[in-house]
Image (tube, rainbow, N blue to C red):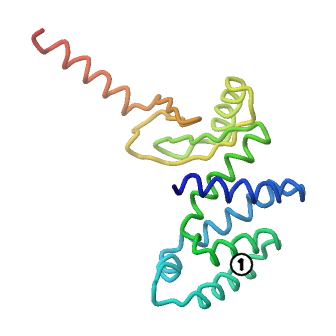
Amino acid sequence: MTGGLAKRYARALASLAREEGRLEAVGSELESVGAWLADPELEAALASPAMSHESRKALVSQVTAALDLSPLTRNFVALLTQNDRIAYFPAIFRAYNALVDRDLNRLRAVLRSAAPLPDAVAAEISRSLEQTHGKKVLVSQEVDPSLVAGVAVEIEGKTYDGSARTQLAHIARAMTRQGSPH
């Protein structure tokens, strides 16, 4: 249910943003809203039944004004608040990004490594992904010390794992199979 709802809100917003020629700008503004909504205290306040609907709307209005959002984004967040849909914001934001990425012929990838990668290495991986997929690739990086070494790339729901952790796990499974009686 929430997936369909998120997509409907995202499509409506993308349609309006497209008309204004602001697809990416609205996406950036939504990212700011998402960072704001990720604050645990704010999230708890907005979800609290003790907070009246009017107080919730006033809080959202103050914050969106402080974030210096465009009228379109400000009105969209106000609409979500008014319709008690602000809790769906993360799903709506993901759906919006997927629509914009499709419109702009691009993909998103997550590059995980045990330590931060030098910019040149990340750029080379990004270029390689672009050549492979034939689209612009937006790469975000995450550090995961459990990988030990190497990198794992997640793109289009698939993970390409070249990490030392995975390689060691493959070796361990192979050794277990060889050492066990058939």
Residue 65 lies left or right of residue 92; in this view the side is right
For the C terminus, the image quarter is top left
Question: Which image quadrant for residue 108?
Answer: top right
Question: Which image quadrant for residue 23?
Answer: bottom right
Residue 74 lies left or right of residue 46; in this view the side is right
Residue at x 39% of width, y 38% of height: 148
Q: Position of residue 98 (x, y in %)?
A: 67, 46
Residue 91 lies left or right of residue 68; in this view the side is left
Residue at x 47% of width, y 28% of height: 162
Residue at x 65% of width, y 81% of height: 60
Nearer the observer, 176 or 99: 99
Per the image, label 1 sits on a secondary structure element best described as: helix
| Residue neighbourhood size for the residue with mark 1, other residues' Cα within 10 Å, grouped as few (<14), some (14–19), many (≥20) | many
Extreme residue in the left direction: 181
Residue 63 lies left or right of residue 155; in this view the side is right
Q: Amino acid at mark 1?
A: Thr
Residue at x 61% of width, y 57% of height: 6
Extreme residue in the top direction: 182
What residue is pinned by disc 1?
Answer: 64
In this view, 78 is above or below 24: below
In this view, 90 is above or below 133: below
> How many dots with numbers?
1
Q: Position of residue 71 (x, y in %)?
A: 82, 73
Q: Position of residue 14 (x, y in %)?
A: 77, 55
Nearer the observer, 62 or 53: 53
Q: Position of residue 27 (x, y in %)?
A: 74, 58
In this view, 123 is above or below 57: above
